[in-house]
Image (cartoon, coloured by chain):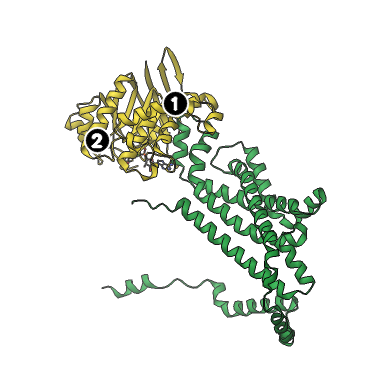
Amino acid sequence: MMLEVKALSKRLPDGRPLLKGISFDVREGELVGIIGLSGVGKTVLLRCINRLTEPDGGEICLRCDGEEYRITGINGHKLRDIRRKFAMVYQDFNLVGRLTVLDNVLIGRLGRISTLKSMIKRFSLADKEEALEWLSRLGIENLAPRRAETLSGGEMQRVALARAMMQGCQVLLADEPVANLDPKTAEEVMGQLVEITEKNNLRTLAVMHQPELVRRYCHRVIAIKEGIVAYDGKADIDEQVLAHVYDKASGASKVA
Amino acid sequence: MNRSSLTSTTRLPALPKWLRFRYFAWALGIGAFVGAAAYLEFSPQALAEGAPRMINFVRQLFPPDIKVLPSLIAPALKTVLMAAVATVMAALMSLPLAVMAAGNTEMPKALRGISRLLIEVARVIPDVVFALIFITAVGLGPFPGTLAMAVHSVGMLGKLYREAMEEIDPGPPEAVKAVGATRLQVVRYAVIPAALPAMVSDTLYRFDINVRNSIIIGFVGAGGIGYRLIVAMRLFKYQELLMILLLILGIIWVTEKLSDRLRAAIFGQPLLR
Ligand SMILES: Nc1ncnc2c1ncn2[C@@H]1O[C@H](COP(=O)(O)OP(=O)(O)OP(=O)(O)O)[C@@H](O)[C@H]1O
Ligand SMILES: [Mg+2]
């Protein structure tokens, strides 16, 4: 019952390898932190997993409900169907600025209602109630009628999380989910992320830049360095490993 | 400081060769302009000799004939309505065409090509030609004129809508796509909301243009204030002609103000940023 990433590779447009065979898996109810230097390819890795970016090689496989879904090598409506199971919270949120917060959250449901109904914004009452429910769980239900473009960064982040949750996803890909939050709100959101992951049996990947938060909230951590997995293990990562992960001078990346 | 290195780095690059002949180029340009004007039978002498006649004509325009004003209201209204209906029709036709034509809506290539071609054709053919085509179908009157303006407007609105859609931030549409949404849902929930301000602005701009055009379309039999203008000219009713021109000026001024107001009302909410 897990998400498997096998030998994922991706080259930059100029041909230099960015990811050179990344393999790991994420179990149900597990929150895995991803760390690594800026520019190492963490965002690209997440985008490859739901195929917003096309990987050059490797396989991504989701086992849930006794079935095996392969997201690599499919297209069209099959890809669309599987994408519903993958939710993403973007580094820059990607909300639709001119729509209300509530509409932005409801967008998470688009994969499940008919195109025709959605053209005239025909969401069911239950959908609307659930959207409001997620907003209130994240402490921002009072923002529901506001236009998304008028929110602060931290508010946008939580709306993006609510949208992801409306998807009823199996996999949650969160790119720096707490980067724009003050320390206290960051702790709150991380706490909610763990809770949501455990309660809904999600497989969650969260790109993180704060080792303390990783230690406190993640179940496991994966470090990426020079295109490969440099560390995969307990979240209580020790300083030595951390120093290695964030050490720019070592290895070939500097030469390349 | 090292003087020699300074001079060597600050030396200006040499002028391109053709620029060294710039006096020659200027002479050539001026010569071409004078030649073109002569070909178009420009004659300052004729203009000077005709000046008294021109002044006489302008004098005959005054004073404007205010008595005819009541009889001009209905034709003026007709002209404005033709422009309004044509603009709405054009917007309705342009929206789906632009969605299909835009490069970031992931529509099938064939549809994209066809819609781009249709928009281009509508733009290249002048509205007067469309008017003549529709007149052969339905006869004279405001109907063919309005249709003609609508179809021709698609050429501009379709292109502007398409550009408005292509200029939006690609992030939100991608996020909606990643949810598992269909292409139409992406258009409805991410592309159109982001492009809407520009599209409304484009539409109001086109309405301004169509008010002017519907006057001209009136010359060729669509009626309205343009028809009254041509009749007054033919019958040498110059004072009535001036009244009509003043009214047209008023209409254009009012529509411009109105669309500015509308634009401000829709997009003028200041953000607290
Ligand atoms: N479309 C692209 N064209 C060229 N280079 C790209 C493209 N997308 C990403 N890159 C490059 O790939 C590298 C990895 O980018 P990525 O966004 O994954 O980094 P990251 O690990 O998420 O960094 P950060 O922590 O700063 O978010 C960067 O050097 C980036 O410049
Ligand atoms: Mg990133």
**Residue at the (29%, 26%) spot, across then down:** A32
Foreground: B56 or A80?
B56
Position of residue B96 measured from the top left corner of the image (x, y, whole percent): 61, 41
The quarter of the picture where residue A151 lies is top left
Question: Residues under labels 1 and 2: Cα distance?
Answer: 31 Å
Q: Amino acid at mark 1?
A: Leu
Position of residue A95 measured from the top left corner of the image (x, y, whole percent): 41, 39
Which chain does the numbered disc 2 sit on? A
Which chain does the numbered disc 1 sit on? A
Query: Which residue is labeled 1 in the image?
Result: A125
Question: Tell me, what hue is chain A?
Answer: yellow
Foreground label between 1 and 2 = 1
Q: Quick one: label 1 or label 2, which is nearer the N terminus?
A: 1
The answer to whether A254 is drawn above or below residue B61 in the figure is above
Disc 2: CA contacts within 10 A as few (<14), some (14-19) or many (>=20) = some
**Residue at the (65%, 61%) spot, across then down:** B212
A215 sits left or right of B87 in the view:
left
| Res A231 visible | no
A15 sits left or right of A217 in the view:
right
Question: Tell me, what hue is chain B?
Answer: green
| Res A235 visible | yes
Q: Amino acid at mark 2?
A: Ala
The quarter of the picture where residue B55 lies is bottom right
Query: Which residue is labeled 2 in the image?
Result: A186
Position of residue A60 measured from the top left corner of the image (x, y, whole percent): 42, 24
**Residue at the (79%, 72%) spot, across then down:** B235
> Is the C-beta of the residue carrying label 2 under 8 Å from the nearest atom of ligand 1?
no
